[in-house]
């Protein structure tokens, strides 16, 4: 994961500086979605020189590289690191990634056969068991 993150910055011609590392480390140790302000507040305790702009920029780079899930909250979008980068099933409530079941892969193959469509991803976006229980 660390290598993928470093690469995401290199692709933008940027280095994974100590400040950016602090943002990544904060996201890695918190397993719930965090807004940029929350990341800033948590990371600043350990890295007092960290700026809010760095947090925003770092989150943006990681998000553009597909390494974060965006979760909508009441106030601001929250972000969580993806744990299964190849996964295409995720919860919009908590950002949880779920592994693809075999029959979903079969559905993708079926789409290719029937429609001649060169599909490489099939996204399932919704609420995980825990989040749907919270709502009902
Ligand atoms: Zn969830």
Image: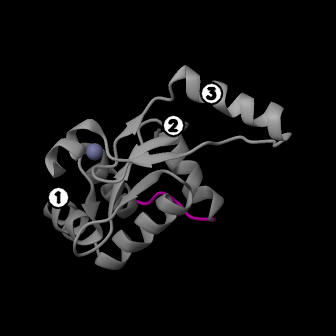
Residue 22 location, x and y as percent?
A: 31, 57
User: Given this view, does label 1 or label 2 mark the residue nearer the observer?
Assistant: 2
User: Of helix, strand and loop, which one carries label 1?
Assistant: helix
> Which quadrant holds residue 82?
top left
Pick the front one: 7 or 123: 123
The secondary structure that most of the magenta stretch takes on is loop
Residue indicated by mark 1: 46
Magenta stretch in the rendered image: 13-17
Judging by the rendered image, the residue that carries numbered circle 2 is 87
Extreme-right residue of the structure: 116
**106 relative to 39 in the view: left or right:** right
- On whether residue 107 falls in the magenta region, the answer is no
Residue at image point 17% right, 58% down? 46
Residue bearing the label numbered 3: 105
**Could you say where residue 134 lies in the image, as x and y percent from the top left?**
15, 47
Name the quarter showing ligand 1.
top left
Q: CA distance from mark 3 to mark 1?
A: 43 Å
Q: Earlier in the sequence, mark 3 or mark 1?
A: 1
Question: Along the line of sight, which residue is nearer the eye, 73 or 127?
Answer: 127
In the image, what residue occupies the spot 30% across and 51% down? 27
> Earlier along the polypeptide chain: callout 3 or callout 2?
2
- Labels 1 and 2: the sequence-earlier one: 1
Query: Does label 3 point to a residue whose CB lies under 8 Å from ligand 1?
Result: no
Labels 3 & 2 near each other (Cβ < 8 A): no
Residue 52: % across, % down: 29, 76
Q: Left of 78 or right of it: where is 62?
A: right
Depth check, front residue: 94 or 123: 123
Quarter assignment of residue 49: bottom left
Please determine whether, in this image, residue 61 is positioned above or below residue 91.
below
């Amino acid at each position: 994961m660390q290598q993928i993150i470093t690469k995401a910055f290199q692709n933008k011609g940027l280095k994974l500086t100590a400040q950016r590392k602090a943002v990544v480390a904060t996201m890695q140790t918190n397993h719930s979605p965090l807004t940029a302000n929350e990341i800033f507040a948590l990371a600043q305790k350990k890295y007092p020189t960290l700026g809010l702009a760095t947090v925003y920029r770092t989150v943006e780079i990681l998000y553009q590289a597909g390494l974060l899930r965006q979760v909508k909250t009441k106030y601001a979008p929250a972000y969580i690191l993806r744990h299964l980068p190849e996964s295409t099933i995720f919860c919009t409530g908590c950002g949880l990634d779920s592994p693809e079941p075999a029959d979903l892969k079969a559905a993708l193959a079926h789409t290719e056969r029937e429609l001649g469509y060169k599909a490489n991803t099939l996204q399932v976006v919704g609420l995980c068991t825990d989040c749907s229980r919270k709502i009902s």
